[in-house]
Structures are given as C-alpha cells and as structure tokens.
Amino acid sequence: MIVVQKYGGSSVSTTEKIRNVAKRIAESARNAQMAVVVSAMGDTTDELIAMARELTVLPDGRELDKLLATGEQASSAILALALHAQGVNAVSLTGGQAGIITEKVPSKARILKVDPKRLKEELNSGKVAVVAGFQGITDNASWADITTLGRGGSDTTAVALAAALKADRCEIYTDVDGVFTTDPRVEPAAQKLDTISYEEMLEMAGQGARVMHSRAVELGELYEVEILVANSANNTQGTLIKKEDQSMEVRNPVRGIAHDDDVARLTVLSVPDKPGIAYQLFNPLADSNVNVDVIVQNVSQDGLTDVSFTVSNAELEKAKSVLAPVMKEIGAKELVTDENMAKVSIIGSGIRSHPGYASQMFGALSSEGINIIGITTSEIRITCLINKENVKPAVRALHKAFKLEKA
Ligand code: ADP
Ligand code: ASP
Ligand code: MG
C-alpha cells in the first residue's frame, strides 16, 4: 500500500510538533510505503516574502521562488532527521528531486508532469520519502530553475504525487478537523462536513477557503484521487473530497460560505466605450499571469466609461505596472486602487437547480447594512464584492441565513 500524507505549516511550526508528526508517520509507515509532503515551518514563507519586500516592492520572480522554496527544503530535511531519531529510515527530497516538473511561471507555476522514478526507488528501498512541498523545477537540464506553485501549493504537491504514485490514500493534515461549512475561525458554529464534492471544494478553495489549494482539488478530480482532509493534532475523522454522489443530493443545497479578504480593486477611470478596449486592458494582464476576477463596467456617459476589477493584493503592484503603459495607449484618465476589499461567496451544487438564492443572499447582506460593490456567479456559486471591514459579519449572516449552523 502507498500512502501520501501532507503536513501544513502550522503542523510543523516547532521541533516539538515535528517530533509528533514524525511519530504519526512512523506509525503509518509500519503498514505502508509513505511519501510525506511538508510545508515550511509556521510563518516562514510570510517572513521570507516580507524580507524580499523590504528590499523591493516588486521582487524578481525567479529569485523570489528560489528564496521561498528554501522554507520547504529546510522543513523536509528537519522532518527526515526527526524520523531518523524515531528509528525510521527516511530521505528528504526537493520538489525537483521528487520529479515535479513545472512550467516556467514564477510564483504560481503549474505542474506539467511528475516523473516519480527516484521517488519510487526510495520507497522500494524501504525509506519514507519526505518531499519539500510547494515547489518544482523547470524542465531544462542545466538551465532548470526552481519554481513555486502558488501560496498553499504544498497541497498540490501531495495530490500530484498521489496521482503519479497511484497511491491508495492521499491525506492532507492541517490545523482544523476537516473542511467546514465556513472558516471555523470566523464562525464558531461552522460544521465539519463528512464529504464534499470536488466541484464544490474547488469553488470554496477558489474563493478563499484556504484549507485546500484549488489546483490540488483540480488534480484530484482529474486523476480521481480522493483527498482526506484531517487534523494533524488528533484522530477525528476528517472530510473526504470525492466525486459527487447521490447521498450528497439530499442535503442543504448550499454547502458552504467562503471568504477572501486579500482583494484589491483597480478602477480605470474614463476609458473610451468602444470595441477592443476590454481586450486591450485585460490581455496584457493575462499575458503577465495576473488573475483578474469580479469585473464591473459602468454605463457610459459621453462615450466614456469606468472599468473596475479585482486582483489579489499580492498581485496589485504587478497589475499596476502592467497597466501603466496601457492606460496611455487607450487614453484612460486615471487608475485608482483600493486594497481593502473582500469577497464573500455562497457555494453548493444545489444552487444550480434552486432559483432565488441570489436574492436571499442579497437580503441577508442588506439586513446587516452591508453594501454590495460587485457580483460574479458560476453555476454553483454566487460571489459578492464588499468592503473588507464587513467580511466577518457577512460570513456570519450568510452562514445563518442558509441554515448551515450546528444543530
Ligand atoms: P496548512 O498550513 O495546514 O496548509 P492553512 O492555513 O493553509 O493550513 O489552512 C487551514 C486553515 O484554513 C484553517 O485554520 C482555517 O482557518 C482555514 N479555513 C478557511 N475556510 C475553511 C473551511 N471552510 N474549512 C476549514 N478551514 C477553513
Ligand atoms: N509554504 C507555502 C505557503 O505558505 C506553501 C504551503 O504552505 O502550502 O504558502
Ligand atoms: Mg494550506
């Protein structure tokens, strides 16, 4: 049997916690071949980013990736040492050594392929392989560069390795008991879900439920890897992310509420309202790999209009620098930005067949006096853009309005 386990940053934030994680791994390794993916210790990644930003507002992508990847390289070696101390034969590997090949896109590279040859050999020789999460390497021999997979990307490392190894189990260990109806740190009445479909989890993750990385869920669905999310500090049952099944149909059509308060809004003022302008604005952003979300265009007056859209705060500086030359080209008047935005979403596969959820959502927000600045939807999700200061009351109001609280 092959098992892939992943331990997140807060589960390995101290050597004491690493010792406990090593004990859990030693236990599982008695009956299985184990590949263990580990995140950087505690807040290491944030600290490294802060250090880079002290020196420059827009750090070079290649250097930043190389810097951030050290966090996971350190924790993987430390965990291997902790396993040795428990008498477990273990070897630590970087993402590249584990065969993770990515595209050459700094800070959010997608995995192109996994070559698990070395990993399999290590497992077959009786070792626990401890793989540095969140990173890969570009496929260019001596010009290969270290890349990272985006914040929270160690989950993706784990699912990609589980798929490549055809593992029997893929287990993501974190600091909560599983996937909840909403972030249990924002709403203590949130309920743990026993199961959730890939589709719903993907929307939750995409809208800020950082308990799982979106790309990990996408890979899980693609390669049919069921993903167990559970607590590294206890033995409660956790949440299984899997294909939608019939038993999921009878429950509440809304599965959960997600929020993301790391949102910046950019507004391009007074752009000519004519064909091609949206393309001129958004194409360079896409080329620079900036993810654009909630887009709102005002009704034009005198042939001019304002276009607003959101990006993550981490990408704001990049978006501004990409747009600067475009602004001149299209004759826009000004670019104004607001870093204090948030998104709140209701998610559930039942939404597609139940009309009226949008109005119920707007009603719940308005009864809290919360102003809606923009809206986006998918088949199974409705998202409202709001001010950051309103995010917690919004989550709580929606959790209550959609009857997701513990009985
Ligand atoms: P790790 O370091 O283990 O990867 P993360 O901090 O990335 O952990 O993710 C776990 C956190 O995700 C939890 O502590 C919780 O605050 C947050 N979270 C947000 N939404 C949810 C949700 N719906 N269910 C569970 N946790 C959530
Ligand atoms: N250490 C990285 C981060 O903080 C990756 C991860 O934890 O999954 O985003
Ligand atoms: Mg995480």
Image (cartoon, rainbow, N blue to C red):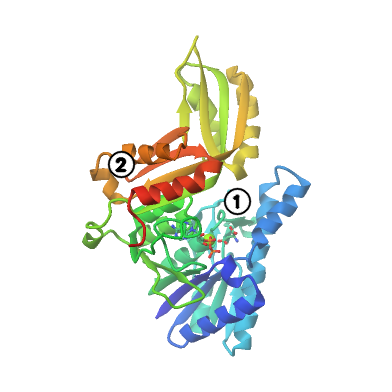
Q: Position of residue 360 (x, y in %)?
A: 32, 40
Q: Quadrant of the C terminus?
A: bottom left
Q: Residue at x 60, y 43 (%)?
A: 313
Please identify the quarter of the rendering in which residue 248 is found.
bottom left
Residue at label 1? 107
On screen, residue 406 versus residue 83, left or right, reads left
| Disc 1 residue type (three-letter) | Ser
Q: Nearer the viewer, residue 59 or 105?
A: 59
Please, is residue 162 above or below residue 56 in the view?
below
Q: Quadrant of the N terminus?
A: bottom left
Q: Position of residue 178 (x, y in %)?
A: 43, 66
SS category of the residue bearing label 2: helix
Label 2, residues with CA under 10 Å away: few <14, some 14-19, many ≥20: some
SS category of the residue bearing label 1: loop
Label 1, residues with CA under 10 Å away: few <14, some 14-19, many ≥20: many
| Disc 2 residue type (three-letter) | Tyr
On screen, residue 286 versus residue 199, left or right, reads right
Residue at label 2? 357
Give the Cα separation between the discs numbered 1 and 2: 36 Å
The reply to whether residue 277 is in sight is: yes
The answer as to whether callout 1 falls within 8 Å of ligand 2 is no
